[in-house]
Image (cartoon, grey):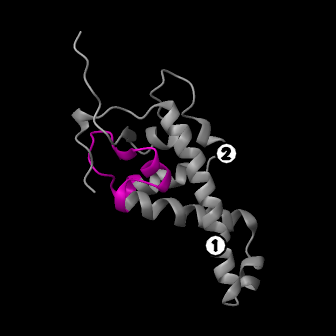
Amino acid sequence: MNAPDASAVGLASTRQRLGTLLIDLVCFFAFSWVLGAILGLVGLGVVLESVPDLLLGIGILFVYYFPQEVLWGRTVGKRIMKTQAVGEDGSPLTPRQALGRTLWRLVPFEAFSFLGGNGRPRGWHDKFSKTKVVSATPVQVVAR
């Protein structure tokens, strides 16, 4: 999917961002459970038990977020909430930006860095990776 035209979209709202966070959290845990079940069924459960929980969580987080954002600029949550991650100029995410967004998610409580403000938030994983999350549907311009 191509990035939306930067002039035709606005930043995602706090409601959209919070909805995305909650949906992706559920999907992340479901993905983790399914991955663990599959690895257990093929006999790799012992290997999983030997990996420290923190490293396992980081690995699963990376596998969940990075491919979705580098390929489409959207996670499952962003698709449902009709938003998309793009570069600051509205261009599609580069692999480096997608990696930056994923790595910044590892900072404790970073997920809440977009809350507050003016209703059109940017979290740390947006600011420091030079990206933004926009509504994937055109914003209607109201004449004044």
Q: Residue furthest top?
A: 144
Note whether 13 is above or below 98 in the view shown.
Answer: above
Spatial distance from mark 2 to mark 1, Cα to Cα? 25 Å
Image coordinates of residue 125 in percent, x first then y, are 50, 44
Give the amino acid type for the residue marked by disc 1 in the picture. Val
| Figure check: 83 above or below 59 | above
- Count all numbered tags in the image, as a single digit: 2
Image quadrant where one finds the C terminus: top left
Q: What's the residue at 46%, 49% (across, down)?
A: 80
Q: Is the residue marked by circle 2 packed among few (<14), some (14-19), or many (20+) residues within 10 Å?
A: few
What is the x, y in percent for residue 16? 48, 37
Q: Position of residue 64 (x, y in %)?
A: 53, 63
Q: Residue at x 35, y 58 (%)?
A: 72
Tell me the residue at 74%/66% (across/down): 53
- Give the class, few, some or many, for how many residues have Cα within 10 Å of label 1's Cα (few <14, many ≥20): few
Residue 17 within the segment the image draws in magenta = no
Query: In the figure, residue 9 lies in which quadrant?
Result: top left
64 relative position to 30: left or right: left
User: Label 1 near label 2: C-beta < 8 Å?
Assistant: no
State which tag comes first along the sequence, 2 or 1: 1
Residue placed at 69% from the left, 87% from the top?
41
The amino acid at mark 2 is Pro
Q: Nearer the viewer, residue 59 or 116?
A: 116
Tag 1 residue: 34
* Residue with the mark numbered 2: 108
Q: In the structure shown, which secondary structural element does the residue marked by tag 1 occupy?
A: helix
Q: Is residue 127 left or right of residue 107?
A: left
Would residue 121 appear left or right of 92 to someone viewing this image?
right
Q: Which residues are magenta?
A: 71-97
